[in-house]
Amino acid sequence: MSGPTVHVATDATELTDGHRTIGGAAIRAAVDSIIEQLAAEGVGPADHLSFHCEPNLSSALLWLALLQAGYSACVSAADSRVRALEPPPFCRLRVRAQWDGPRVRVEECGGWNGARVQGEPRMIFHTSGSTGSARLAAHAVARLWRNAANCVERLGLRAGDRLVIPVPIYHMYGLGAAFLPGALVGASMEIQAASSVLRFTER
């Protein structure tokens, strides 16, 4: 099962992290390239992936590729400000984006217990741990896209809109309420790392 096509409505549509910018049809081409790289590395839909996600453009493009191609992944922060969690034992491979084309780095996870994806693809997030130890919460990929469509309707997003995302896209809020809705309509988006009130209001 795969997600909907990522819409790029006009040549003016852009994705940026404040350091690198990609626009128009190049967004679509980059997502397709990452999907092809994953297939060439032998990554299949039955593989649980560990996705080390950073607040940058490379990880944003990898997000779109994983969701559109219907992969399952356990997401953790690869942000230097956040302690990266070890992959759970059901993850066979670790994936991480690099800005070189862009490219995706694929590595074997140590301690894989042989588990395979059963049923529809899903994304698994670490909770904040505010009520104790951090736990894992699974979200079906199809429901992530439906949630994004609901956000588009509720927020009235359209192609040509410009969004600033000051919260991490490795959390459900930044991903589900901002990044994916923006991708569905072809909005231009800025992903902010180490954001602050001053930087947000400046943008």
Image: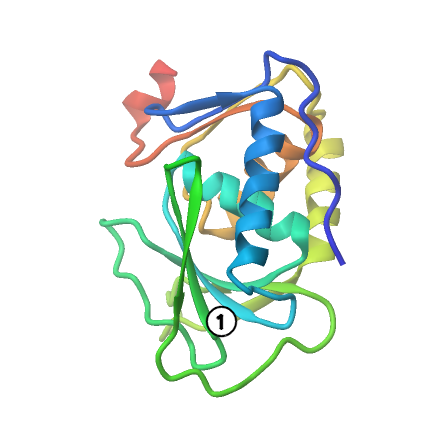
- Judge from the rendering whether residue 166 lies leftward or rightward of residue 71; answer left or right: left
Q: Which residue is mark 1?
A: 136
State the SS at label 1: strand
Q: Reply above or below: 118 against 39.
A: below
- Residue 19 visible, this angle: yes
Quadrant holding the N terminus: bottom right
Name which residue lies at 67% across and 57% down: 70
149 is higher (above) or lower (below) than 112: above
Q: How is the image coloured?
A: rainbow
Q: Is residue 45 above or below residue 59?
A: below
Q: Position of residue 112 (x, y in %)?
A: 43, 82
Residue lying at the far left of the rendered structure: 80
Residue flagged by tag 1: what amino acid is it?
Answer: Leu
Q: Residue at x 60, y 32 (%)?
A: 29
Can you give x and y, in whole percent of width and height, for residue 113 in the image?
A: 47, 87
Q: Residue at x 63, y 33 (%)?
A: 183
Residue 129, image x and y in percent? Answer: 38, 67
Q: Is residue 124 among what the camera can see?
A: no
Q: Quadrant of the C terminus?
A: top left
